[in-house]
Image (cartoon, rainbow, N blue to C red):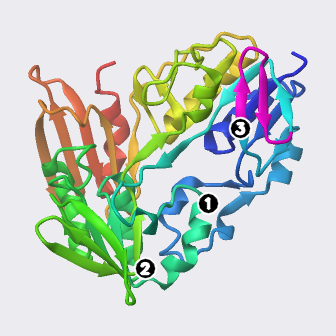
């Protein structure tokens, strides 16, 4: 390899890939290009910054310069890639070009902003950069509306509530975490949030946002409205696929990859929140760690094949943390739920009495690893 490996993106996935490559090869030329500062931070901490009274700068763990020196990289921060010529194997920005032997798209995902009148008033908190842009608004806001009661919405609702803010969560589902688990399983967290004073507007559709002299008025169906100081979109993530389109590779929901993390172009790979593996987009830490290890092998000419085991998903709500695994979204499971002061153990069984999914909370989370072993391969 003389042009080496070019990686577009600087998030957790890109960094894990760099670390895995350098464990095996200290010399292969590595270039990292990203639209942000390329400073390292721990993205899950974004769910706790407001209650901890932190600023965006407090999240930085390692600067771009330190990272480049430690791992022997060419870094290009604050650089927008405008095009990829896959035939010539060239990545282009406005004023320069990079040639590659192997290209990795680690472009991440962006927050889906509901297309309602006034949508420009919504804040998004999907990166250190976005949090930095929103931090003074969030610090001063006493009343916060969160659009979406899924994983991120529930985590942010608890964080803002712990920071002493009046929090309203709106979601068109009948319960929180509706895409992750059935209502009888999520109800323990739902009760905890309402006990903390979080106002849940479920089965409710946001219709518009309007700035007034005293705040932002959010209007919903059935002639309801609330006035708040800040509105945060937490309605899910959309894989960033624009550059993959420029490169002419196959896209479905995300950038389609095989078990070698390879796209439909054999010299272009995708990793992290932008990648679609076996029809699934998996924006969680463990699949990204395993994918990065596998991809590093393939980029260095060894054969790596991604095999994903059953993995824990963690809901980072400190007053009532949850771990879940398996096919928790399946509609046909029969759930048994045991609750006590120590926590909850919910187990979902199929018609053959085979454990297919579980959710554990609080003290019972230590049972998660033994339960994982009971899930079928």
Considering every residue shown, the one lying at the far front of the view is: 117
- The front one of 43 and 188 is 43
Quadrant in which residue 348 is drawn: top left
- Does the magenta-highlighted stretch encompass residue 87? yes
Q: Marks 3 and 2, how far apart in space?
A: 40 Å
**Within 10 angstroms of label 1, few (less than 14), some, or many (20 or more) residues?**
many
Q: Pick whichever of labels 3 and 1 is earlier in the sequence.
A: 3
Q: Which mark is residue 370?
A: none
In the image shown, does 164 or 213 lie closer to the viewer? 213
Q: Nearer the viewer, residue 195 or 112?
A: 112
Where residue 54 appears, as percent x and y from the top left, is 59, 74
Instruction: Assess whether mark 1 and mark 2 are in contact (beta carbons under 8 angstroms).
Output: no
Distance from disc 3 to disc 1, alpha carbons, whole Å, reads 23 Å
Residue at 85% across / 32% down in the picture?
97
The mark that comes first in sequence, 3 or 2, is 3
Which of disc 1 and disc 2 is earlier in sequence? Answer: 1
User: Which residue is denoted by mark 3 in the rendering?
Assistant: 82
Q: Which residue is mark 2?
A: 163
Residue corresponding to mark 1: 128
Q: Secondary structure at mark 3?
A: strand
Is residue 43 a member of the stretch shown in magenta?
A: no
In the visual, does 142 lie left or right of 301?
left
Q: From the viewer's perspective, is the residue at label 2 or at label 1 nearer?
A: 1
Give the SS element for disc 1: helix
């Amino acid at each position: 390899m003389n042009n080496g490996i070019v990686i577009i993106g600087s998030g957790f996935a890109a960094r894990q890939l760099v670390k895995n490559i350098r464990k095996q090869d200290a010399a292969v030329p590595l270039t990292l290009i990203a639209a942000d500062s390329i400073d390292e931070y721990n993205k899950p901490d974004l769910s706790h910054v407001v209650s901890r009274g932190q600023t965006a700068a407090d999240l930085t763990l390692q600067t771009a310069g330190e990272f480049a020196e430690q791992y022997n990289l060419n870094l290009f921060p604050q650089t927008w890639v405008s095009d990829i010529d896959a035939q010539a194997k060239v990545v282009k920005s406005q004023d320069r070009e990079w040639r590659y032997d192997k290209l990795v798209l680690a472009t991440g995902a962006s927050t889906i902003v509901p297309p309602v009148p006034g949508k420009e008033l919504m804040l998004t908190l999907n990166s250190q950069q976005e949090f930095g842009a929103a931090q003074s608004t969030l610090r001063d806001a006493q009343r916060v509306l969160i659009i979406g009661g899924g994983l991120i919405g529930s985590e942010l609702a608890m964080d803002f509530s712990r920071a002493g803010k009046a929090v309203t969560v709106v979601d068109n589902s009948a319960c929180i975490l509706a895409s992750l688990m059935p209502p009888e399983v999520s109800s323990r967290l739902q009760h905890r949030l309402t006990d903390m004073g979080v106002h849940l507007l479920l089965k409710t559709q946001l219709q518009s946002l309007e700035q007034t002299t005293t705040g932002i008025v959010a209007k919903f169906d059935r002639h309801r409205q609330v006035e708040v100081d800040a509105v945060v979109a937490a309605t899910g993530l959309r894989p960033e696929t624009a550059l993959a389109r420029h490169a002419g590779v196959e896209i479905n929901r995300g950038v389609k990859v095989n078990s070698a993390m390879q796209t439909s172009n054999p010299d272009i790979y995708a990793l992290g929140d932008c990648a679609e593996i076996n029809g699934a987009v998996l924006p969680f830490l463990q699949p990204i760690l395993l994918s990065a290890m596998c991809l590093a092998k393939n980029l260095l000419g060894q054969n790596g094949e991604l095999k994903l085991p059953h993995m824990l998903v963690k809901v980072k709500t400190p007053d009532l943390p949850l771990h879940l695994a398996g096919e928790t979204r399946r509609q046909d499971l029969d759930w048994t739920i045991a609750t006590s002061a120590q926590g909850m153990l919910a187990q979902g069984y199929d018609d053959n009495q085979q454990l297919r999914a579980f959710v554990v909370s609080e003290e019972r989370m230590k049972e998660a690893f033994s339960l994982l072993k009971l899930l079928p391969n």
